[in-house]
Image: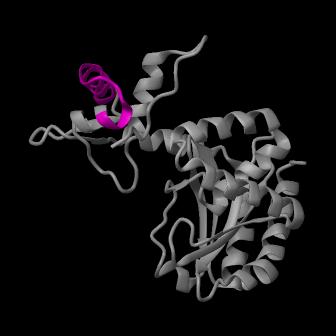
């Protein structure tokens, strides 16, 4: 298995031990509850003795816990306080929530607000229709692939407009992450997404992440210039491409404009 969360090469002004410790924490997500020392080493490409010391430090800080019987590691309650502190100061969540709820209620699906973290988009707010709530497994904190999702493509397209140099660097990082064999197909999809955004103001994902799910997304400018992404989606037989383009996309773009205006973004 190739490393999932290999830390970036240390550069001037950074602390490599801290980067490696964060790489260990990022090994865990909603689908990975616990990992052994060997699995952490494999996923981060960090030598096992170093992983052992990093994990012990994180346990001591209350960010990881170790099962005394299996010796496997999992996230500890200390990460919750960090996530709460982060979410509590994102005013955009409070502003976006009623707009997202209206989209879900009126259009019959799910709306997600996300920020980028590494090579993923992380959901920070969710609104669902009653029907969608019975089917969706995504929760706040769920990670969605950056390169293949409508959310990720909207973020990248927005970044290309606001920070072209950062966009080029992120594309280079994505190419290294996914490998040269997979990159031409992904790059073509991302280029198409930028064109669609330029022409229509949104990006699409038609079964690219989950075959039965279709979604449309838009970048959400913020006051500091770092885009977020807002989407709407649902099952493919209800959220057809035609429905997304002609009914959902105009409403989603209007919601994004209203949120950006209310948080003081351009």
- The residue sitting at 66% across, 62% down in the picture is 150
- The answer to whether residue 92 is visible is no
Q: Is 116 or 145 nearer to us in this picture?
A: 145
- The answer to whether residue 163 is visible is yes
Find residue 27 and report its image quarter: top left
- The residue sitting at 39% across, 37% down in the picture is 3
Find residue 195 and report its image quarter: bottom right
Q: Is residue 122 left or right of residue 43?
A: right
Quarter holding the N terminus?
Answer: top left
Answer above or below: position of 250 versus 257.
Answer: below
Residue 147 forms part of the magenta stretch: no
Q: Is 261 or 136 nearer to us in this picture?
A: 136
Start-end of magenta stretch: 42-60
Determine the residue located farthest toward the top in the rendered image.
12
Answer above or below: position of 131 versus 178.
Answer: below
Residue 47 forms part of the magenta stretch: yes
Position in image of residue 8 (x %, y %) = 52, 26
Find residue 125 and report its image quarter: bottom right
- The residue sitting at 9% across, 41% down in the picture is 69
């Amino acid at each position: 298995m190739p490393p999932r969360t290999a830390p970036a090469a240390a550069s001037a002004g950074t602390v490599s031990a801290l980067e490696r410790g964060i790489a260990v924490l990022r090994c865990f997500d909603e689908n990975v509850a616990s990992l052994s020392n060997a699995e952490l080493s494999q996923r981060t490409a960090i030598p096992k003795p170093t992983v052992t010391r990093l994990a012990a430090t994180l346990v001591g800080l209350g960010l990881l816990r170790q099962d005394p019987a299996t010796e496997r590691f999992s996230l500890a309650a200390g990460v919750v306080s960090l996530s709460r502190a982060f979410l509590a100061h994102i005013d955009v969540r409070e502003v976006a929530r009623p707009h997202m709820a209206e989209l879900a209620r009126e259009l019959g699906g799910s709306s997600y607000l996300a920020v980028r973290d590494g090579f993923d988009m992380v959901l920070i707010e969710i609104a669902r229709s009653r029907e969608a709530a019975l089917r969706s497994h995504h929760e706040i904190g769920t990670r969605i692939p950056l390169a293949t999702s409508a959310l990720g493509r909207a973020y990248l397209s927005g970044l290309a407009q606001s920070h072209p140099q950062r966009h080029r660097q992120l594309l280079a990082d994505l190419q290294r992450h996914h490998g040269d064999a997979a990159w031409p197909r992904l790059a073509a999809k991302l280029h198409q997404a930028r064109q669609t955004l330029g022409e229509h103001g949104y990006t699409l994902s038609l079964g690219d992440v989950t075959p039965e799910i279709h979604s449309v997304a838009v970048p959400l400018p913020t006051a500091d210039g770092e885009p977020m992404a807002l989407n709407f989606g649902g099952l493919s037989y209800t959220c057809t491409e035609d429905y997304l383009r002609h009914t959902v996309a105009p409403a989603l773009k209007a919601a994004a404009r209203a949120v950006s205006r209310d948080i003081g973004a351009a």
